């Protein structure tokens, strides 16, 4: 039974959120008539209902009730330059006057391709699509075609988008004591389970065991070089190098999904770790805020997409490579040079250190993981090395995270409700310090709830 004090704290936070977001509540009720749950994206939902945005400017979002929020969500990490950056807006304006998509190639497409190839040493050639999901799907298709094998080694709890073959174990297997067992998510064909082999992240021994036994079935390893959506878990020392070596030893390709992690270094996390995958999936930031995905890598693999070849792999998409996305993408990367990457990575470190100090000062067990401009908090001081560890840490503290999220929204700071914070370039130390201060105050308020959870 929660104590009276804890009930009052929760009621107060909930009530202040309802009062602050009355118009969003009205809009939610209208939206629910036409959209299941009132929105189009499951990830954007949180209880009682998400606020409705009317405008974004720099690192701030404004809602239907006129509230301002410091935005640490940045459309799920994709808005590296925050909202409506003037240089990107200019590029978009100039292009839209000349048309949006033309049904034939535009020069901007190979300019963006060249920018990415020059930044990422493993990318010899690249193709564009409209989402990170498409990007991982085509990496996998290329791997099947190139190797003649059907299977993939995937991280248990890893997320690579919405297509069927990666909608297996997006939540880790919490039951099996030995190897994680494949489980397709609801509605996904169960035949996918036969081709997906699993290993926990940061575990070279299990990866080797699975590869050794199934090398004739596995076309590629597909993995993020850090677990992004799967919990913000960085790779341990030598892990990525170890996975590269295993891929070579057992004759499988290595696919890195850098849809989230590309932002942490001008050449992606692969360049930071000095590991060259065979194929890479990109998305999120490379479109300057517009829908985008891209996949690329070794020339001998990517050549299979050349339509001059008689048995080429078909890859189309009505909006792929459209001129506006390409223009926004070019402007976006031009204003994200090494210096800027390093500046926001330093802000990410300030945020991580600030959160850790706040946990300590308030006396609630907790820790912050992350790399560069990405940070994820958990209510545990134990090291989390894979997705199962993350989920085990989340289960007892689910309510604490929920009220922390609502209270920080009440105080004008927006982060992803599972505990993820993303820094954008319009931010400076001031914004980081505001966030840390708000975090500390909110933790202080939630101390009795945290104490109750610890004693359960
Ligand atoms: C690591 C990773 N890969 C792929 C995707 C899928 O990208 P999209 O949502 O653009 O399809 C996501 C989306 O969050 C992601 O985090």
Image (spheres, rainbow, N blue to C red):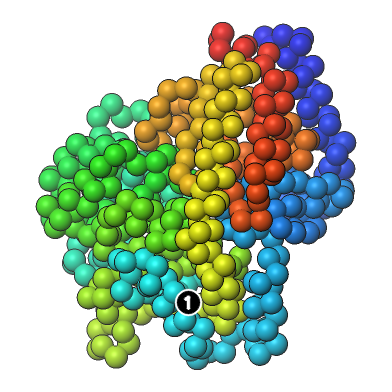
Q: Residue at x 44, y 74 (%)?
A: 115
Q: Quadrant of residue 7?
A: top right
- The front one of 434 and 179 is 434
Indicate whether 356 appears above or below 78: above
**Residue at point 44% right, 83% down?**
110
248 on left or right of 225: left
Expressed as whole percent of the image width and height from the top left, the position of residue 228 reads: 46, 46
As drawn, 393 above or below 169: above
432 in relation to 302, above or below: above
Closer-to-camera residue (90/133)? 90
Q: How many labels sit on residues?
A: 1
The residue drawn where x is 51% and y is 59% is 339
The one nearer the camera, 304 or 412, is: 412
The percent position of residue 313, horizontal first and vertical second, equals 31, 78
The residue wearing badge 1 is 112
Is residue 157 in view? no
Residue 61: x and y in percent read 75, 52
Does residue 224 sit above or below 140 in this rendering?
above
Residue 396, picture quadrant: top right
Residue 268 seen in this snapshot = yes
Which element type, helix, strand or loop, lies under badge 1? helix
Q: Where is the N terminus found, in terms of image quarters?
A: top right
- Say whether residue 297 is left or right of residue 322: left
**x, y percentage for residue 19?**
87, 36
Q: Is residue 124 left or right of residue 351?
A: left
Residue found 21% across the figure and 70% down from its top? 146
Mark 1 crowd level (few <14, some 14–19, many ≥20, 10 Å Cα): many
Q: Is residue 306 left or right of residue 38?
A: left
């Amino acid at each position: 039974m929660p104590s009276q004090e804890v009930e009052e704290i929760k009621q107060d936070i909930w009530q202040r959120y309802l009062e602050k977001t009355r118009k969003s509540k009205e809009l939610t009720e209208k939206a629910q008539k036409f959209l299941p749950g009132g929105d189009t994206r499951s990830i954007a939902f949180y209880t009682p209902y998400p606020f409705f945005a009317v405008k974004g400017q720099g690192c701030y979002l404004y809602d239907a009730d006129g509230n301002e929020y410091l935005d640490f969500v940045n459309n799920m990490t994709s808005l590296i330059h925050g909202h409506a950056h003037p240089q990107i807006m200019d590029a978009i304006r100039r292009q839209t006057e000349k048309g949006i998509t033309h049904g034939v190639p535009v020069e901007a497409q190979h300019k963006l391709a060249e920018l990415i190839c020059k930044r990422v040493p493993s990318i010899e050639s690249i193709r564009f699509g409209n989402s990170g999901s498409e990007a991982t799907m085509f990496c996998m298709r290329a791997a099947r075609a190139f190797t003649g094998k059907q299977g993939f080694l995937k991280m248990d709890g890893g997320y690579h988008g919405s297509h069927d073959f990666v909608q297996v174990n997006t939540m880790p297997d919490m039951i099996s004591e030995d190897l994680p067992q494949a489980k397709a998510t609801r509605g996904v064909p169960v035949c996918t389970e036969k081709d997906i082999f699993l290993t926990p992240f940061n575990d070279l021994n299990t990866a080797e065991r699975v590869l050794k036994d199934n090398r004739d079935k596995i076309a590629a390893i597909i993995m993020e070089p850090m677990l992004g959506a799967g919990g913000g878990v960085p790779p341990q020392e030598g892990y990525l190098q170890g996975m590269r070596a295993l891929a070579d030893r057992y004759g499988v390709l290595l696919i890195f999904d850098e849809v989230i992690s590309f932002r942490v270094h001008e050449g992606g996390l692969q360049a930071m770790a000095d590991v060259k995958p065979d194929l890479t999936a990109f998305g999120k930031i490379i479109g300057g805020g517009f829908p985008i995905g891209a996949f690329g890598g070794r020339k001998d693999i990517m050549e299979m997409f050349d339509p001059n070849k008689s048995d080429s792999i078909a890859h189309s998409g009505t909006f792929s490579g459209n001129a506006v996305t390409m223009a926004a993408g070019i402007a976006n990367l031009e204003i994200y040079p090494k210096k800027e990457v390093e500046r926001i990575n330093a802000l990410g470190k300030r945020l991580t250190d600030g959160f850790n100090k706040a946990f300590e000062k308030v006396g609630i067990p907790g820790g912050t993981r992350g790399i560069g401009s990405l940070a994820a908090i958990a209510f545990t001081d134990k090291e989390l090395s894979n997705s199962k560890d993350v989920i085990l840490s989340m289960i007892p503290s689910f309510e604490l995270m929920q009220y922390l999220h609502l209270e920080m929204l009440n105080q004008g700071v927006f982060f992803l409700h599972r505990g993820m914070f993303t820094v954008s370039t319009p931010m400076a130390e001031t914004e980081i310090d505001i966030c840390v201060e708000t975090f500390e105050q909110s933790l202080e308020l939630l101390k009795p709830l945290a104490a109750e959870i610890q004693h359960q």
